[in-house]
Amino acid sequence: MARVLITGGAGFLGSHLCDRFIAEGNEVICMDNLITGSTDNIAHLLGNPNFKFIHHDVTNYIYISGDLDYILHFASPASPIDYLKLPIQTLKVGSLGTHNTLGLAKAKNARFLLASTSETYGDPAIHPQPESYWGNVNPVGFRGVYDEAKRFAEAMTMAYHRYHNVETRIVRIFNTYGPRMRLVDGRAIPNFITQALRNEPVTVYGNGQQTRSVCYVDDLVEGLYRLLLSNEVEPVNIGNPDELTMYDLAKEIIELTNSKSEIIHEELPSDDPKVRQPDITKAKNLLNWEPKINRLEGLKTTIEDFRKRLQY
């Protein structure tokens, strides 16, 4: 049995990671300040003797008694509406939060996994994006608070690895979806599903021709788990390279929900990436990983989860 700390563990991705590590027979400590996470996501685990929830902000000093084998740092606002509303908190969790969790990893001799993001590539000039691409980020734009926080977190992680010999792993997560996403999340899939189930106009930004590549959460968790247990120190992309336009995704969700919604267009937000597609060659070769779950299958499961919570 390993002892695992998951920061941001009451969030969408964090809660699915808690499930995976509990299922593997480990002891899980979930830490979250709940500014974007929710105890609803971990309610089913609260009675488990191998699960513990700590309400704490990781930008403050972290105390954990006893040994730790793994630390997975997933604490951060991750939706544009969140980091535009919480810009200082986003910067602090990427800097101070990463510093604190790396310091804990050093003290506990624990392996550390940083949740980084495809946003480190910014509005990319290379397509698809390999890990070797350094990115095209506007540091003073509205999205810079998230992009640069994650880029700093990567630099800090590598510094602790090189200077303090901490065992570190870095995952660059591409767009992920699935059950437990917030109903009003600000990202495309939750917005489209919620609007479609309510038969409201489905909002597509710009002309809708910007692309994303969406990965079902179970596939992502499998990739993260394999990366954690691997020997790879440099960043690894985890995502689904199956690319489609936002307009086509909106149409697909309207059809899957049997919605009467129509698509409307609004102004494209500042610095919104025009394309996003992971090059997962590295994950295939090093981790023997690639996504398995078909998008339509994943969307149907996600829609049913949203339908239950919305009661439509």
Image: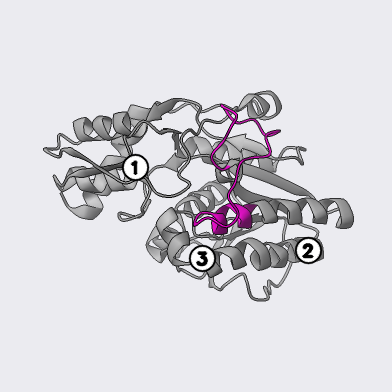
The kind of residue tagged 2 is Lys
Give yes or no for residue 127 being in the magenta stretch. Answer: yes
Q: Position of residue 135 (x, y in %)?
A: 63, 40
Residue where numbered disc 3 is placed = 87
Which is more foreground, mark 2 or mark 3?
3
Residue at mark 1: 189
Q: Nearer the viewer, mark 2 or mark 1?
A: 1
Q: Amino acid at mark 3?
A: Pro
Q: Which residue position is annotated with label 2?
A: 108
Taking the spot 17% from the left edge, 44% from the top edge, the residue there is 201
> Counting residues from the N terminus, which is met first, the one under dot 2 or under dot 3?
3
Please determine whether, in this image, residue 89 is positioned above or below residue 228: below
Picture coordinates of residue 244, whole percent (x, y) = 39, 27
Percent position (x, y) of residue 81?
40, 58
- Mark 2 Cα-neighbour bin, 10 Å: few <14, some 14–19, many ≥20: some
The structure residue drawn at horizontal position 67% and vertical position 30%, both measured from the top left corner, is 287
> Looking at this view, is 149 or 51 the one in front?
149
User: Secondary structure of the magenta portion, mostly?
Assistant: loop
Residue 43 in view, yes or no: yes
Q: CA distance from mark 2 to mark 3?
A: 31 Å
For label 3, the SS is helix
- Dot 2 or dot 1: first in sequence order is 2
Label 1 or label 3, whichever comes before in sequence order: 3
